[in-house]
Image: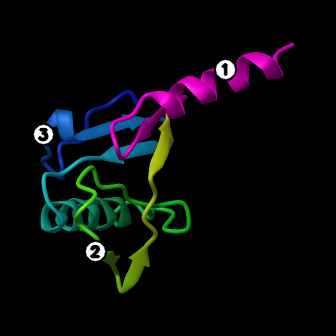
Amino acid sequence: MDIIPKDPQLPALWTLLYADDMMLAAKDKAKLERQLQAWQDWLGKFRLHLNMKKTEYMTMDQDIISTILIDGLDLPMTNAFEYLGSMTAANGSHSVEAITRVNATWLKW
């Protein structure tokens, strides 16, 4: 993305944008739901939208089991996700990333 959006005002570290991929981070569920809603509202002004079928959430706190609701839709929870080719695991393990890179290397042979 060539521009930094001026609205919604979100701290740079908590929003990562690249082309059509976006990753949000928040310290709690309520903040994440507000961020998602703010992005959905802002994108709607330009007739754009988040693809809720591709949207999922991950929590680093394994003791918390809750749902994220956006426009009445329950987002699926995941234990790992890929962003720009790098895997991030909810338990903080780097094994998912290592396995992904090894598999990608083998596929190139």
Outermost residue, bottom side: 72
Q: How far apart are marks 3 and 2 (CA)?
A: 25 Å
Q: Where is residue 80 in the image (x, y as percent from the top left)?
A: 47, 46
User: Within the image, what quadrant is residue 66 found in?
Assistant: bottom left
Q: Where is residue 99 in the image (x, y as percent from the top left)?
A: 61, 28
| Secondary structure found at label 3 | loop
> Label 3: which residue?
11
**On the picture, is 99 further left or further right than 76?**
right
Q: Which residue is drawn at 33% across and 65% down?
A: 40
In reply to whether residue 91 is colored magenta, the answer given is yes
- Earlier along the polypeptide chain: callout 2 or callout 1? 2
> Label 1: which residue?
102
Amino acid residing under circle 3:
Pro
Q: Where is residue 62 in the image (x, y as percent from the top left)?
A: 28, 57
User: Within the image, what quadrant is residue 74 found in?
Assistant: bottom left
Magenta residue span = 84-109
Q: Which residue is drawn at 82% across and 16% down?
A: 108
The answer to whether mark 2 and mark 1 are in CB contact below 8 A is no
**On the picture, is 76 further left or further right than 28?**
right
Q: Which mark is residue 12?
A: none
- Earlier along the polypeptide chain: callout 3 or callout 2? 3
Depth check, mark 3 against mark 1: the one in front is 1
Amino acid residing under circle 1:
Val
Amino acid residing under circle 2:
Ser
Q: Position of residue 4 (x, y in %)?
A: 26, 33
Q: Residue at x 18, y 65 (%)?
A: 29
> Label 2: which residue?
66
